Image (tube, helix red, strand yellow):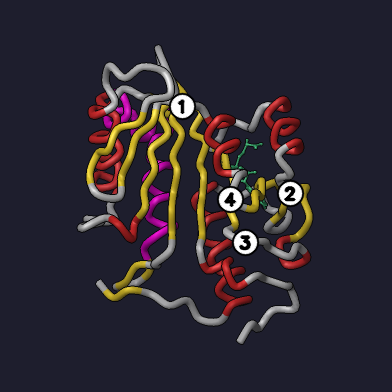
Amino acid sequence: MPSSAAVFDHNASMRTFVLRARAAPTDSRALLVGIGSEAHPEILAHALMNAVFVAQAHRPGVIVHLVLESTPDYSRAIRFDFDAMHDIGGFDERALLGRIAQALDVSRGMGKDEARAVESGVEVRTTGFERLVQRLAADHALYVMDPKGRPIRDEPLGDRPCFLLTDHIPMPKNTFHTLDRLGAKRIALGPTMLFASQCVTVIHHELDRALGPASVTRD
Ligand SMILES: C[S@@+](CC[C@H](N)C(=O)[O-])C[C@H]1O[C@@H](n2cnc3c(N)ncnc32)[C@H](O)[C@@H]1O
């Protein structure tokens, strides 16, 4: 039974995260050698890890979109549908960044707004953050993570919640206007500025606490 005073919809057990990685390179080699650099591609691995893995198990119903925007041609949006992946692999940075690098390699030479399958459950598309979010708005309730937003426990979450985050580079003001037009709500996780990957853990925690213990799939 829900244990929180907040009102959460049943479909909140489906969880979608979009991480806009403004500094992350779309070149796979630059991504892999960039760990610890200004670009901080490790943020992507940490977000994937916290989205799907728990101790000795993983969470069903989680989808993550990573949008890498440091590019000479088009941004890359990589979609991970973990339920459809045969083998998620390890949760270390090397393994997770390896999956992202593989998707970037598959996307080489693609034209604007094309999509390619990378492996079961993983797809790469040459599209930007705003276009992706416009698509998601059709069948998700959008939430932009913002420390100045409404506390998550006060916000009734709608069907298929989709949480929008950035890396260490803030979301441009214009994007907020677009998101407002799409009906995205700004929600906060407390007064401390967290890493995007930490937000993912706290969001799961808030949903778990509202919906009861998470059902997990044992590894
Ligand atoms: C490291 S923060 C981004 C920091 C960036 N310099 C900025 O000012 O937006 C990464 C992501 O986590 C979100 N975030 C961090 N702490 C948060 C909090 N307490 N509540 C809601 N979102 C938070 C931010 O909105 C952002 O999407």
Decide which of tag 3 and tag 2 comes sooner along the chain.
3
Residue for point 43% across, 77% down: 215
Q: CA distance from mark 1 to mark 4?
A: 18 Å
Which secondary structure lies at badge 2?
A: strand
Q: CA distance from mark 3 to mark 2?
A: 13 Å
Give me the disc on residue 139.
Answer: 4
> In this rendering, which labeled residue sits more in front, label 3 or label 2?
3
Toward which corner of the image does residue 181 lie, by quadrant? top right
Residue for point 71% across, 54% down: 188
Q: CA distance from mark 1 to mark 3?
A: 25 Å
Which secondary structure lies at badge 4?
A: loop
The image quadrant where one finds ligand 1 is top right
Which secondary structure lies at badge 1?
A: loop
In depth, the one of 89 and 16 nearer the eye is: 16
Toward which corner of the image does residue 99 lie, by quadrant? top left
Q: Which residues are magenta?
A: 30-53
The amino acid marked with disc number 2 is Lys
Where 158 sits versus 113, above or below?
Answer: below
Give me the disc on residue 127.
Answer: 1
Which secondary structure lies at badge 3?
A: loop
Where 85 sits versus 5, above or below?
Answer: above
Residue at the spot of label 2? 185
The amino acid marked with disc number 4 is Asp
Residue at the spot of label 3? 159
Residue labelled 2 has its Cβ within 8 Å of some atom of ligand 1: no
Decide which of tag 1 and tag 4 comes sooner along the chain.
1
Residue for point 47% across, 76% down: 214
Decide which of tag 3 and tag 4 comes sooner along the chain.
4
Q: Quadrant of the N terminus?
A: bottom right
